[in-house]
Image (cartoon, rainbow, N blue to C red):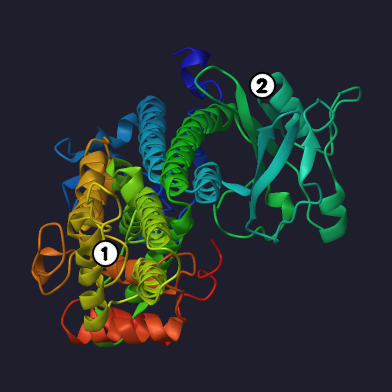
Amino acid sequence: MSPADLAPTPAAPGARAERVEVTLLPPDSPHLSAVRDAARAAGAEFVRASSNPDPAELMQRLVVVDLSANAATSRLGPRVIAICPRLDLECWEVIPPHEVRWRMRRALRNLVEVERLSRRLDVERDTIRVLNEIGYALSAQTSQSTLLDTLLTRMRRVLGADGGSIYLVEGAKLRFVCSQNDTIPFRANRLELPLNESSLAGFVAARGEALNLPDVYDLEPGLPYQPNRQFDDETGYRTRSMLVVPMKDRSGEVMGVIGLVNRKADPGVPLASFDAVEAFSELDCALAGSIASQAAVALENYRLYREIRNLFEGFVDAAVTAIEARDPTTGGHSHRVAALTTELARAVDTASTGPYRAIRFSERELTEIHYAAMLHDFGKVGVREQVLLKSHKLYTWEMESIEGRFRVARLQVLLEQARAGGPGDEAELRLRHLVEDLALVRRLNQPSVRPTADELERLQAIGARWEATLEGQALLHPRELQRLCIPLGSLDAEERREIEQHVTHTYEFLRAIPWTRELARVPDLAYCHHEKLDGTGYPRGLAASEIPLGARLMTIADIFDALTAGDRPYKPGMSPERAIEILRDEGARGRVEVEAVELLARRQLWRGIIGAH
């Protein structure tokens, strides 16, 4: 046997040498010297067993058992070498007592090698499992701060780091964003670093290469970077080993830097002594680089997600701005309805008593409700502008035409008076009637005026009494009479139907958008915002069971804002208290969600919303 056969097997490049312990049972076996020498030759550590060994400790060691005098059991296990005259034992190898001196070294060397390989295989399996877990954990995050905190927690645990920090590249600077430390609370004394080689993080970011420092207090002179010792000086902490790796995106650009400090044997446990700190191995460096690459991809995906979301929110704001530009009298309505609906949904979600105590909205559902409320009136782009902007019962040109006819009628009376030879009582009476009739038309043209029975009768008499021109044209046309008889508001039945079609236009528009799965119900929620629980709503007359709760809440917010808004031409804005009274009346009639109205009133959810947009 050559000396090379007796030498310990070298560890894999970059790997930390695995400590393998060997013990002998019973500890007073006459083969003690041979086993001890064989263990040392195999690169293992011989540990003498106590007279009453702990089974848990034995499980962590390779065991040589001397059964020369007693072979009571035949099943010993694959990590045991038996010294026994019987050769039928189930174990790694059975060595007869007279062959121990020349066979023990080879047997123990082979067993130690297999043990090391098995442990490395376990490490590789754990590494793959950890990488998969980290990848899954990172891909599930939709918040940058949570993503980075999760990354640092998992990375420190895998690599046994006591502390760590993350810096992100922002232009020509590195911005501190996250830190953790098991032994002492860490606080950054510099929130920004220049992106140059003067600091450890800056050096790694500028070069795109990792730094693995066994002891940051023992650096070679002349290096461009120097560690920042201020934290250690202020707290008494002792930074020794440090591993700093870059986070690179798919194109190789450095997005940030992850720094890990003070490797230790027990992850998550505070350091009892800084003398227990270990250096990071090359294997640790490779694993950290792999995790950092995963993190960079996750961060890049998050930023892309955020940019897409910002782009979509910009589109939504632009769409709302476009529709409100067509109708300035409702400016801010969509934002207020969205804010109030979302607040009402959150109030339902947090209710601990009453009918909503078992109802919960996820963040995804709240986002869905928010977008549906923001876009609930977008279909008004399909409504004719003259109808959308109609502020009186008569269109402006209709009122101007009527006033023109009244002027013609007055001139006709004056002309007849002149032909009759001068002023007369009948002519003065007719002129006075013209003034009164025109005043009535102007009054009834106001959207807030509800005509009385007497006013309706006088209005009909105007059309029958006057002829505005010599051709016998009526002073008021039938369509004008019809519009002046509108009970309340500015729209007649045909125009109201056109306005109500905006709900269908909204649905058709929103349905054409390729929504993500998280926002797939936005079109349906917006489609229901004018439905009532008793089936009297529009456009489909849905029953209560067919209307989603989010849409019911939106209906209440929409009505509340319409009542309290002070920018409507046909009515002054109401107080929130008066609007709540009207909503309670609607609830009593079975048209809106009573419990939601009471929740709105009890928590006064409109505070900070009414008048804010």
Identify which amino acid the numbered label 1 is placed on.
Gly
Q: Image height check: is 225 above or below 252? A: below
Depicted 597 relative to depicted 213: above or below: below
Residue 170, given in percent of the width and then of the height, sits at 69, 33
Nearer the N terminus, badge 2 or badge 1? Answer: 2
Regarding residue 68, the answer to whether it shows in the image is no
Q: Is residue 63 above or below residue 255?
A: below
- The numbered mark at residue 209 is 2
Q: Quadrant of residue 440?
A: bottom left
Which SS class for mark 2? loop
Quarter of the image where the N terminus is located: top left
Residue 136, image x, y percentages: 36, 41
Q: Judge left or right: residue 266 versus residue 408.
A: right
Task: Determine whether, in the image, residue 567 is placed left or right of residue 273.
Answer: left
Q: Is residue 201 above or below residue 482?
A: above
Q: Residue at x 56, y 65 (%)?
A: 612
Instruction: Sort mark 1 into few (<14), some (14-19) or many (20+) by Cα contacts within 10 Å.
Output: many
Comparing 184 with 509, the one in front is 509
Q: Amino acid at mark 2?
A: Glu
In the image, 81 versus 231, the foreground residue is 231
Q: Percent x, y for residue 156?
A: 56, 46
Question: In what element is the residue under mark 1?
Answer: helix
Q: Residue furthest right?
A: 222
Give whichever of 360, 224 is nearer the camera: 360
Residue 479: image x %, image y %?
20, 55
Task: Give the side of residue 383 with respect to residue 543, left or right.
Answer: right
Quarter of the view holding residue 174:
top right
Q: Do the CB atoms of the residues marked 2 and 1 lie less than 8 Å apart?
A: no
Select label 2 or label 1 by which is in front. 1
Q: Which residue is mark 1?
A: 550
How far apart, in angstroms, are the residues tagged by discs 2 and 1?
52 Å
